[in-house]
Every structure is written in structure tokens, then in C-alpha cells.
Amino acid sequence: IWTTVFGRRMADEALFQFLHYELMQYIYKSADSKETENGRNITKLENMGFRVGQGLIERLTKDTARFKDELDTMKFICKDFWTCVFKKQIDNLRTNHQGIYVLQDNKFRLLSQLSAGKQYLEHAPKYLAFSCGLVRGALSNLGVKSIVTAEVSVMPTILLQKI
Amino acid sequence: MAVCIAVIAKENYPLYIRSVPTQNELKFHYTVHTSLDVVEEKISAVGKALGDQRELYLGLLYPTEDYKVYGYVTNSKVKFVIVVDSSNTSLRDNEIRSMFRKLHNSFTDVMCNPFHNPGDPIQSKAFDGIVSGMMVQTG
């Protein structure tokens, strides 16, 4: 179901957003009935994103040339991968050339419906978990081990840091 | 038509091996295993051949056995190996490429299957079907 949502045109973005919200509600509700462990919910979401990222990358790189190096891989993530998932490219990519990359998206699709400033900032991390997993899964399937973290200072801008 | 088809994970263990004359299966396993070295060598020499996704025709690894072994590596470092009977010289380059294409497409479908864990042996019937279509038919 994950990949069919990404494959179609037109309404798929709204579909994905709704699915994503529902998914989060589901995870959090099922946790409430047993134990409350906020960290674990985020991990579950992240792991789901991981698996989806792996499959998605397999499909996307089917016809592309081989990547020359890590930077090339990151550029692919910023352009093609991000466009496929979020319909736009990453706005800013920074690196220290020693393995740390920072990706900045100024209008993150999954957050733009929430607010346009500082409101609801504390709820933002939940919405980012899946996307972090997505990037981590994509990178892992391309042979890059990484830790992906995201931070939000002003909605809907997000900064993804990959180590 | 292939005599043996193998899919090898990026950690170099087999995800899927199928060969047709099943009595010689071990020999094919061994062939595939040794071809991995050649594959590695080609990947590391990719600096000059930029953007080259496929590796073809690794050549006759065993001059006595008369098999041709072809290799193909995806961007996710998964390797496909096809072993072909050398007496079957009617098989052309394009056909081998299209076989790899089909394999890759089928493999992508397997990866996207949520019930499949990456790293597990491939158990998809659809994948089996595609591979059977490419193997030599034995009477």
C-alpha cells in the first residue's frame, strides 16, 4: 500500500498526509492502552519509515546510474527522492565534508497544515519520525549507514541532520 | 536461456539461487561464489567508467566448463548473476540485458512487498515465475 500511494498522480499527496496522520494516531492510541512509552512510539514510526524508504529507493534507483560517492548519494536524496515523496526538492544542503549533512526544507509538506509559526512546536517531532526513518532507510539501502535526526525551529521548516 | 540464476545480497550471501540441471547444483553455487570476486573487482574499478550501471559478460570463468557468467549490480549493491551454457551462442548481449532488466523489476517488486524483510531469502512466487521463464526448459 505504501508504494502504490507514492506511485499515482494527483490526489496522492493528500492521501499520504491523511494516511500519515491516521498512522500516528493509531500508534499513539495503541500505546496508551498498554504502557506509555513515548520513545517507543517514535521508534515504531521511524522503523516503518525505514522499511518504506528501503523499498522506495529500490524502485527509484532502478534506472539511475551508479553513485560516485556519498555526496552524490545525498544529492540524489535531496533532489529525486525528496521530489518523489514530497513533490519538491530540499531547499538547502550543507555538509562539513566529514560525514555530517544537514538538509533543510523550508516548507515541509507534512507540517505545513499544522501551523505557520511557533504554534504546536512541541508536537512536531512526532510528525517527523516517519520521514526520518524514510531517509535512513533510503540511505541504508544505498549502502550508507546513518543516524537521521530532525529539528524544527519555525514551522514548517525542518532541518534533517544525517551523521 | 539461463542455466543458473542467483541473487546475492550486498553482504554477499545468496538471497536466491536456482539452477536447472539440479544434480549439479553445488557446482553452480561454487561458480556463482567465485564470480563474486570478479564482480567486486569490477565495482572497485568503476572510477573511470562513470555512471555505468551494468556489468556484462564477466567472461568465461571456467574455460573447461564452457559456461558464461554475467553479472549485474544494482544501486543497492544487490548482485544478480546469470550462468549461461556457452554452447548456446545464439544468446545475444541485448537478450542478457533484458533478462537482467526483468530480474531487477521483479526484485524491486519483492523489495516493496511489506511482508518481505530485506535480507531474507526470496520466497515470492511471482519472482519464481519470472526466473522459471528465463531458465532452460528441461524436457
Image (tube, coloured by chain):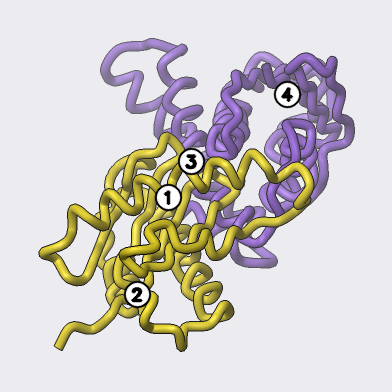
Chain colours: A purple, B yellow
Viewer-side label of 3, 2: 2
Q: Give the labeled residue for mark 4.
A: A160
Disc 1 versus disc 4: nearer the observer: 1
Residue type, mark 2 in image = Asp
Query: What residue is drawn where x is 57% and y is 77%?
Result: B93
Question: Type of residue at label 3?
Answer: Glu
State how far apart marks 1 and 2 are (Cα). 15 Å
Residue A82 sits above or below residue A34 on the image: below
Residue A71: numbered disc? none
Which label's residue is closer to the chain start, 1 or 2? 1
- Which chain is disc 4 placed on? A
Give coordinates of residue B122: x percent, y percent.
29, 53
Q: Dot 4: what SS?
A: strand
Label 4 or label 3, whichever lies nearer to me, is 4
Of the residues tagged 1 and 3, which is closer to the observer?
A: 1
The quadrant the N terminus of chain B occupies is bottom left
Residue A22 image label: 3
Are discs 1 and 4 both within one chain?
A: no
Corner quadrant of residue A82: top right
Task: Indicate whether A42 appears above or below A73.
Answer: above
